[in-house]
Image (cartoon, rainbow, N blue to C red):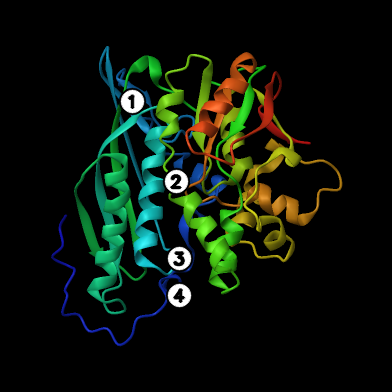
Amino acid sequence: MSTDVLDPAAPVASVPRLTSLAHGGGCGCKLAPSVLQELLRDQPAAGPFKQLLVGTETGDDAAVWQVDEKTCVVATTDFFMPMVDDPHDFGRIAATNAISDIYAMGGRPIMALAVLGMPLDKLPIEVTREILKGGASICAEAGIPVAGGHSIDAPEPIYGLAVIGLVAPENLRRNSGAKPGDVLILTKALGVGVYSAAFKKEALSGAAYDDMIASTTLLNRIGAELSLNPHVHAITDVTGFGILGHGLEMARGSGATLRVAFADLPLLPDAERFAKEGRVTGASGRNWASYGDGVVLPGGTADWQRHLLTDPQTSGGLLVACAQEDAARVLKEISDAGYPYARIIGTVEEGAPKVIVT
């Protein structure tokens, strides 16, 4: 990693809360889906590269390049501003979130590069070291090295990873492979966004903080195992666009309707209360405005319910579409692998590409 800009002698008057230095935090920093689509609208296509199996065409989780008939390289990058004040936890969350993109494609990560931006006049070097240590600890848990990276002096703290992985072509899973008749499984609970909003207002209990950290630092390594199952047709991770936004990407990519039962969605223990109290992120509203007519909610949907459906999930779970006949076994496999909130949340149907909530 190029660290010439990280001067340990830089003067720091005091150590502020990490979250106070950022205008947003976690995956709530992501550009709204509609803004991203507008930015990419006039960009040149990737070109006639037959080895590029996955590019930007379906808003998938990572790019995939086929090296030969047995091997594909999976590449991604993800970084954001802090949603917590503990630098070690921030590093762990950001690293878990970045590595998730590889697992969501059915791949196995092999190495990572750190992406770092720090306001050197506001934070001591020890804080940055702890962020890097936190990220490295998650990479070690995933069995990969942090092999390098890049750092800059930035006005807000930013950290994340570029991650490289491998997958066999037959095990590659995209967000566009869902089939009518499939069952939808979500592997983690929703509510990280409202938890982070409560944290920023110092309204999060110690137990709730522990729940949030447990969720956001749980690696989505189950994706690599699920990809070995031919009955698993599509996988994507649920992050900054919320369950509706990432579900809509799956619906559009697959040319099908996703029907989601609100009552079946797994929620972190205090998520409903925080949503009812209005402890939501700005990204929640931006997400809702971006869905357009691609999302249909039932009449009488309360604001708190909509906020949870649009809640940006930092290092969220995997949304999995699998054949109905194998759904119970797949759910058990996920639960047994250490995902206690895994639930069946809906189905895939023939119809216009949209998400219908019941």
Between circles 1 and 3, the one closer to the viewer is 3
**Residue 235's spot in the image, x, y percent?**
50, 29
Spatial distance from mark 2 to mark 3, Cα to Cα? Answer: 16 Å
- Say which quarter of the image contains residue 319: top right
Spatial distance from mark 2 to mark 4, Cα to Cα? Answer: 25 Å
The crowding category of the residue bearing disc 1, from other C-alpha atoms within 10 Å (few below 14, some 14 to 19, many at least 20), is few
**Residue 165's spot in the image, x, y percent?**
29, 32
| Viewer-proximal residue among 276 and 43 | 276
Amino acid type at mark 3: Val
Q: Which residue is mark 2?
A: 218
Q: Which residue is mark 3?
A: 84
Spatial distance from mark 1 to mark 2, Cα to Cα? Answer: 36 Å
The crowding category of the residue bearing disc 4, from other C-alpha atoms within 10 Å (few below 14, some 14 to 19, many at least 20), is some
Q: Earlier in the sequence, mark 1 or mark 4?
A: 4
Q: Secondary structure at mark 3?
A: loop
Amino acid type at mark 2: Leu
Q: Is residue 303 left or right of residue 239?
A: right
Residue drawn at (30%, 76%) of the image: 123
Amino acid type at mark 4: Ser
Q: Are marks 1 and 3 in contact (CB under 8 Å)?
A: no
Inspect this view and state whether residue 176 appears: no
Q: Secondary structure at mark 4?
A: helix
Q: Which residue is mark 1?
A: 47
**Residue 65's spot in the image, x, y percent?**
30, 25
